[in-house]
C-alpha cells in the first residue's frame, strides 16, 4: 500500500473512533456513581497488608515455604524466580503473609499454591515478566491492534498463574491473587465507554489459566482485579471451585469471572463473583487444545453473582455443552440466565436446568441469536431440553427467546417476575430495548409454561402486550398470569396492534 493511502486510511479510522466516543451526556445514577468511585479490592487489601517477616523463616509441615527459596514478599522485589524454584521442587508451596510481586509462574502436578490469610500474589506491571506467547500450543495468541478501533478488544497470551497438563493441583489458603488491573489501564467514568474508552496498549490475559489437566481444586482464595478474564479452567476433568471470591471493578473491559471451558465433571459452589463481564461462563472452545471434549456434567450452586453482563452464560465456543445444573443462585446482572450460540460455531447445548434462582436483572432469562453469522447449517445446531424452575425476582424483561437456530423442549415452571424500569447500574444502555412484551418467545419446538406470573409494577413504556409468541409448536400453557396494564382490563384485554405496529412487523418479517 502506498504511504499516502495508508495515512488517509489511518486518518479515517481515527476520525471514526473519535465519532464513536461522542455520546450524548448523561448524569450517572447514584448506583453508577458508587461503582465509579468504588476503590479496587486490591487497593483496599494493600492498605492492610505488611511485608513478609523474614526474621525467622520456619519450615511448614507438608509444604515448601516460599521464603526458603528466596522470596522477599515486600511488594517491590520481583519474586518470580523464587516462587518458580519452590514450585519446581515439588509439592504445595506455602506463602506466609506478605506481598509477592511476580510474573508468570507455572504449577506442577501434585502441588500448588497455599496462600495464607494476609498473603497476596500480585501481578507484575512489566510485560517482560510474563510467559512467551508460544510457550505451548494450547495458548491463546495475542490479538490486538496497534491503533484503537471502536469496540475492539486487547487480548494477549500471557498469564500470572499457569498450569498446562497438570494433575492433582490446588490453589487455596485464604489469601489472595491480584491481576493488578490498575497497572495496565484506567476505567472510564462513563460506563457507556467501557468498550470505546482509551486505547489499552497492553494487558495480560487470564490471571489464572489451567489447561488440559485433571483433579483441579481452587478453594478458599480471593481472586482480585483481573485486567481480562479472572480464572479459566480449560479442557480439564474433575474440577472443584469452592468458597472463592472473585472481585473487580464492574466496568472492567471483558472482565469475566469464572470460566469452565470444555471440562468434564466440574463443580462451582459457594462463590461470590463480582465481574465486569459474565460472572460464570460455561463454554466449549477446543480449537487450540490437543483433544476436544464436550463441556459436560457441570454444577453451579449456592453462589452470589453481580455483573453488568451475564450472571451465568452458556453457549460460547465451537463444541457442545450438556448436563448442566445451575441452582440456588442470587443473580444481579444485565441478563440473569443467558443461553445462545455465540460465534455461530457451537452445535449443541442440551440438558440445562436453572432452578431456585433469585434475581434482579434487566432481563431475567434470554436465549439469543448468534452474535455472528452461523458457521453451520441451522439444522445441525440444537438447543434442547432446557428447564427453568422456581425463578423469582425483578427485571425489566422477564423471558426472551429470539434465536436463529432450533430451540427444542423448553419448560418454564413456577416463574414470577415483577417488572421494573431500567437500572443503568446493571446495563449502561446507549439506547433502551424496545420489545413489544416482557415475555417474547419465538421459534420453539415444544414449549410448556406453567405457574408463570408477571407482575406489572413499573413496566417499560414500550410494552404493548403481556406476551408475544410466534412460530411455537406443541405449546402448553397452564395456570399463568402474564399481567398487563390496568387500562387494558386484564391479561385477555390487551389492545390489538396499531397500524404502525403492523407495518413494522411486516417490514421485519424476513428476519424472523
Image (spheres, rainbow, N blue to C red):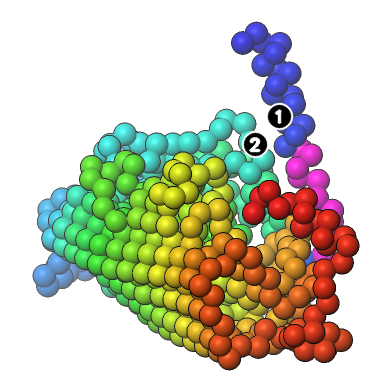
Q: Quadrant of the C terminus?
A: bottom right
Name the main secondary structure of what is drawn in magenta.
loop
**Is residue 19 shown in magenta?**
yes
Q: Earlier in the sequence, mark 1 or mark 2?
A: 1
**Which one is nearer the viewer's eye here, 370 or 202?**
370
Secondary structure state at the residue bearing disc 2: loop
Secondary structure state at the residue bearing disc 1: helix
Residue at 28% x, 44% y: name it: 289
* Inter-mark Cα distance, 1 to 2: 7 Å
Q: For label 2, count other residues whose C-alpha is less than 10 Å away and answer few (under 14), some (14-19) or many (20+).
A: some
Circles 1 and 2 in contact, beta carbons < 8 Å:
yes
User: Label 2, on which residue?
Assistant: 149
Which span of residues is magenta-colored? Answer: 18-27
Estimate the x, y position of residue 136 in percent, counting from the top left: 26, 38
Q: Quadrant of the N terminus?
A: top right
**Which one is nearer the viewer's eye here, 410 or 35?**
410
**Which one is nearer the viewer's eye here, 258 or 378?**
378
- Kindly tell me whether residue 67 is visible in this rendering: no
Residue at 61% x, 79% y: name it: 360
Q: Can you say whether 174 is above or below 237 in the image?
A: below
Residue farthest top in this picture: 2
Estimate the x, y position of residue 331 in percent, counting from the top left: 53, 77
User: Label 1, on which residue?
Assistant: 13
Q: Is residue 270 left or right of residue 169?
A: right
Residue farthest front in this picture: 474
Residue at 56% x, 57% y: name it: 403
Amino acid at each position: 500500500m502506498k504511504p499516502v493511502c495508508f495515512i488517509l486510511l489511518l486518518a479515517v479510522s481515527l476520525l471514526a473512533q473519535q465519532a464513536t466516543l461522542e455520546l450524548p451526556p448523561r448524569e450517572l445514577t447514584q448506583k453508577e456513581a458508587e461503582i465509579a468511585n468504588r476503590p479496587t479490592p486490591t487497593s483496599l487489601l494493600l492498605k492492610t497488608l505488611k511485608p513478609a517477616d523474614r526474621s525467622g523463616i520456619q519450615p511448614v509441615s507438608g509444604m515448601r515455604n516460599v521464603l526458603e527459596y528466596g522470596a522477599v514478599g515486600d511488594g517491590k522485589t520481583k519474586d518470580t524466580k523464587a516462587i518458580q524454584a519452590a514450585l519446581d521442587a515439588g509439592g504445595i508451596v506455602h506463602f506466609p503473609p506478605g506481598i509477592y510481586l511476580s510474573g508468570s509462574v507455572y504449577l506442577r502436578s501434585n502441588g500448588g499454591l497455599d496462600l495464607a490469610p494476609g498473603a497476596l500474589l500480585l501481578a507484575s506491571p512489566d510485560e517482560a515478566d510474563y510467559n512467551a506467547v508460544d510457550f505451548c500450543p494450547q495458548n491463546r495468541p495475542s490479538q490486538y491492534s496497534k491503533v484503537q478501533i471502536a469496540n475492539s478488544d486487547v487480548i494477549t497470551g500471557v498469564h500470572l498463574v499457569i498450569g498446562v497438563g497438570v494433575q492433582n493441583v490446588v490453589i487455596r489458603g485464604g489469601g489472595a491473587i491480584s491481576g493488578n488491573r490498575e497497572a495496565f489501564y484506567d476505567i472510564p467514568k462513563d460506563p457507556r465507554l467501557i468498550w470505546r474508552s482509551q486505547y489499552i496498549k497492553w494487558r495480560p490475559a487470564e490471571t489464572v489459566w489451567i489447561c488440559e489437566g485433571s483433579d483441579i481444586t481452587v478453594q478458599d482464595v480471593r481472586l482480585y482485579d483481573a485486567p481480562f478474564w479472572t480464572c479459566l479452567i480449560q479442557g480439564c476433568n474433575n474440577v472443584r471451585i469452592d468458597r472463592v471470591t472473585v472481585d473487580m471493578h464492574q466496568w472492567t473491559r471483558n472482565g469475566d469471572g469464572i470460566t469452565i471451558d470444555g471440562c468434564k465433571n466440574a463443580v462451582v459452589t459457594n462463590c461470590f463473583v463480582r465481574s465486569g463481564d459474565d460472572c460464570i461462563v460455561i463454554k466449549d472452545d477446543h480449537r487450540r487444545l490437543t483433544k476436544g471434549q464436550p463441556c459436560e456434567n457441570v454444577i453451579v450452586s449456592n453462589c452470589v453473582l453481580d455483573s453488568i453482563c451475564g450472571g451465568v452464560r452458556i453457549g460460547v465456543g465451537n463444541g457442545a455443552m450438556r448436563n448442566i445444573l445451575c441452582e440456588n443462585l442470587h443473580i444481579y446482572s444485565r441478563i440473569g440466565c443467558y443461553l445462545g450460540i455465540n460465534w455461530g460455531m457451537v452445535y449443541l447445548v442440551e440438558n440445562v436446568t436453572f432452578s431456585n434462582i433469585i434475581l434482579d436483572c434487566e432481563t431475567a432469562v434470554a436465549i439469543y441469536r448468534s452474535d455472528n453469522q452461523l458457521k453451520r447449517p441451522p439444522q445441525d445446531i440444537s438447543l434442547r431440553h432446557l428447564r427453568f424452575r422456581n425463578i423469582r425476582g425483578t427485571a425489566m424483561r422477564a423471558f426472551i427467546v429470539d434465536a436463529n437456530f432450533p430451540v427444542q423442549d423448553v419448560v418454564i415452571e413456577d416463574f414470577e417476575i415483577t417488572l421494573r424500569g431500567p437500572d443503568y447500574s446493571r446495563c449502561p444502555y446507549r439506547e433502551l430495548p424496545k420489545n413489544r412484551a416482557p415475555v417474547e418467545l419465538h421459534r420453539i419446538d415444544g414449549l410448556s409454561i406453567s405457574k408463570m406470573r408477571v407482575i406489572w409494577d413499573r413496566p417499560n413504556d414500550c410494552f404493548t402486550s403481556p406476551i408475544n409468541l410466534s412460530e411455537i409448536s406443541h405449546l402448553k400453557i397452564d395456570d399463568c398470569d402474564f399481567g398487563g396494564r390496568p387500562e387494558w382490563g386484564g391479561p385477555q384485554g390487551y389492545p390489538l396492534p396499531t397500524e404502525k405496529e403492523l407495518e413494522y412487523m411486516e417490514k421485519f418479517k424476513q428476519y424472523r
